[in-house]
Image (spheres, grey):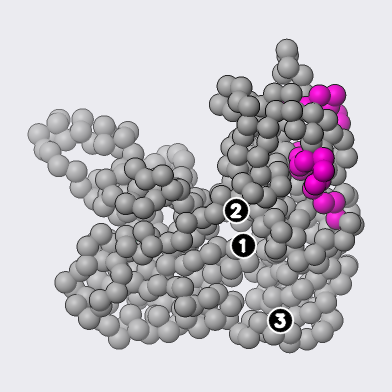
Amino acid sequence: MSEQHQNLAIIGHVDHGKSTLVGRLLYETGSVPEHVIEQHREEAEEKGKGGFEFAYVMDNLAEERERGVTIDIAHQEFSTDEYDFTIVDCPGHRDFVKNMITGASQADNAVLVVAADDGVAPQTQEHVFLARTLGIDELIIGVNKMDVVDYKESTFDEVVDEVNQLLQQVQFNTDDASFIPISAFEGDNIAEASDNTDWYDGEILLEALNALPEPEPPTDASLRLPIQDVYTISGIGTVPVGRIETGIMNTGDDVVFQPSDVGGEVKTIEMHHEEVPKAEPGDNVGFNVRGIGKDDIRRGDVCGPADDPPKVAETFQAQIVVMQHPSVITSGYTPVFHAHTAQVACTIESIDKKMDPSSGEVAEENPDFIQSGDAAVVTIRPQKPLSIEPSSEIPELGSFAIRDMGQTIAAGKVLEVNE
Ligand code: GDP
């Protein structure tokens, strides 16, 4: 086990091989969950067989998926020489975007799986847009199912070109993207260089994963703790709970909740049913603040230090990417914004600029409308107080999803907050 931790997203079009790749990574790194090994041992003993096979891992993942348990590949863990990886919720799963934004599954880096026999497909595009907007740092591109295209270098090159174009369109830094010809199913170039691709001498997948930059723990930033729920616990009183996104919380700290605009001194902090003097980013905590009652605060509030309180936006400017909207978006449109744990109806007050996706330059000032596939800078007015931060200052609290008609129609990053 290594010390450093990475949250990894596996993104890509349906059927391009995401689950198979996760199974392969678990298998190759010897990180198959204990209960799977246990179950296999029993079955193997009954049948008088030993050994542990990739096919078994896949059967097991498929079975879990059928039973609806733990949404299959999400939240699996594996370790390499450098990192402990947690696979976070994957796009395609219900609520992925929402989870990604509420911090339930904040990925540091991502592996984009593109099937060699299919190339860039609609969800490839959508997920790359999203990864870019939500601040994924680096992409590793696994050009998968190379076995299906007879390990042909020319097919690999074609897919690389296609993906490169897409990355440039959304202004991903293509210098940092690595492309690897793989077969998740056959195991080519995952843990060992494959003889089937003797024309390729670049990194294999595990090497590329080891070479990812270390995620910076956001401990230096100011405390930001979005409130998930508020409980009343006898003997303690009001206990807001949530996950610390940035900064440190110590008992004795003076904190405020915004936008509810109340505050006090932190009396106790609890984590995993134990009292702790201090909690850090990533910790799920329940805590108690002197003088705060259950009705004073609510889900969607953000707790921060009294001397550097969370911002409350009168309006804010944001860069958004429209992923899927059946018609056009014009100013005055008021969908629900999901930002950290808050859900607030917000009006798109003005569409300030439309960007050219291929150059990132302004394509049109004050366009009349935007539609699916467009990137734009917009001014937004929350209909109720909303605590949100510029993404450049506190990225963890600077992104949001826009939902309407039961689906995520856009995702965005906050550029500026006008309090
Ligand atoms: P997901 O929807 O992206 O998670 O895709 P799956 O992992 O479920 O894979 C979809 C199908 O493609 C399954 O039938 C897999 O067995 C198959 N598949 C995945 N990776 C490979 C590969 O590298 N080679 C071949 N031949 N088939 C693959």
* Residue 313 pos. (x, y %): 85, 55
The first of marks 3 and 1 along the sequence is: 1
Residue type of the residue flagged with mark 3: Met
Q: Residue at x 55, y 63 (%)?
A: 136
Q: Which residue is mark 1?
A: 134
**Front-most of residues 223 and 56:** 223
Mark 2, ligand 1, within 8 Å: the answer is no
> Residue 403 location in percent, x, y?
72, 58
The reply to whether callout 1 and callout 2 are in contact (CB within 8 Å) is: yes
Tell whether 107 sits left or right of 412: left
Give neighbour class at mark 2: few <14, some 14-19, many 20+ (Cα, 10 Å). Answer: many
Q: Position of residue 176 (x, y in %)?
A: 46, 73
Q: Decide: few, some or many residues near mark 3? Use Cα within 10 Å; few <14, some 14-19, many ≥20.
A: some
Which stretch is magenta?
Answer: 288-313
Residue that mark 2 sits on = 100
Rendering coords of residue 119 (x, y %): 41, 77
Q: Earlier in the sequence, mark 1 or mark 2?
A: 2
Quadrant of the snapshot with the N terminus: top left
Q: Quadrant of residue 350?
A: bottom right
In this rendering, position of residue 217 left or right of residue 330: left
Q: CA distance from mark 3 to mark 1?
A: 17 Å
Q: In the image, what residue type sits under mark 2?
A: Met
Find numbered disc 2 in the image and state the secondary structure of the residue it sits on.
helix
Residue 410 is left or right of residue 151, and the answer is: right
